[in-house]
Amino acid sequence: MLPYNCFKQSVVVLVCLYFVILLIRRRPGTLRIAAGSALGIYIIAAVRLFFSLVRCGPPLGGNVPSVDLNLIPFHSITDYIQHFSVETALEEILGNVIAFVPVGFLVPILWKKFRAPKKILLLSLLLSVGIETVQLIESLAVRYPVRSVDIDDVILNFAGGVLGYLLFRAAQTVWDAWFRSRMTGGGKT
């Protein structure tokens, strides 16, 4: 029998893959298939990472608060920079930013309604707040800080969504210019 975490993880991955397959079947096209596949791989990796970092239980001896909570913006970021090695600070800060770049980049490719800046940025914000909320609920449910709940994670994830969206817009501009040059004969040698 699968452990509970593996079962939860498997269910989430299968549901996500089902929706990615439906998306690709609904509107085939090389770019959509590639973006849908990349989004599917991203979701699987994110789910695996999320569940692999869950702590198994409280340490022996001593009282532990039920929630590891930070609601002060930039507190954790400052702490990483001041008290940890450069490698650890970069890993924590850039890891949270990079984690949401695919959201800002791939989602607008797959769904045109998310090409408006407000929509993709709102999606990035809501996804990040949603993840932190799930971590808070899980910590409260087991009365142990399963994961830290941190406003800085929301800020850094949102920054990653913004960066991904900017990369999407840049790629779209380059693609459109290349496509126009091909259509007008400028791309012929």
Image (cartoon, rainbow, N blue to C red):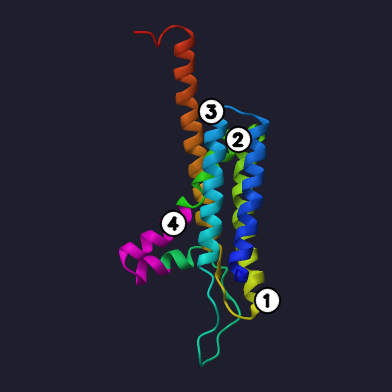
Q: 159 or 140: nearer the eye? A: 140
* Residue 158 located left or right of residue 19: left
Which amino acid, mark 4? Answer: Gly
Which amino acid, mark 3? Answer: Thr
Q: Earlier along the polypeptide chain: callout 4 or callout 3?
A: 3
Q: Which circle marks residue 95 in the picture?
A: 4
Which amino acid, mark 2? Answer: Leu
**2 and 1 marks in contact (CB < 8 Å):** no
Q: Is residue 90 magenta?
A: yes
Could one spot residue 111 in this view of the protein? no
At 46% across and 67% down in the image, what residue appears? 76
Which amino acid, mark 1? Answer: Ala
Q: Secondary structure at mark 3?
A: helix
Q: Which circle marks residue 110 in the picture?
A: 2
* Residue 90 located left or right of residue 144: left
Start-end of magenta stretch: 79-97
* Mark 1 Cα-neighbour bin, 10 Å: few <14, some 14–19, many ≥20: few
User: What percent of the width, then of the height, locates residue 59?
Assistant: 50, 86
* Residue 63 located left or right of residue 167: right
Q: Earlier along the polypeptide chain: callout 1 or callout 4?
A: 4
At 48% across and 67% down in the image, what residue appears? 75
Mark 4–mark 3 distance (CA, rounded to whole Å)? 29 Å
Q: Secondary structure at mark 1?
A: helix
Disc 3 designates what residue?
30
Disc 1 designates what residue?
141
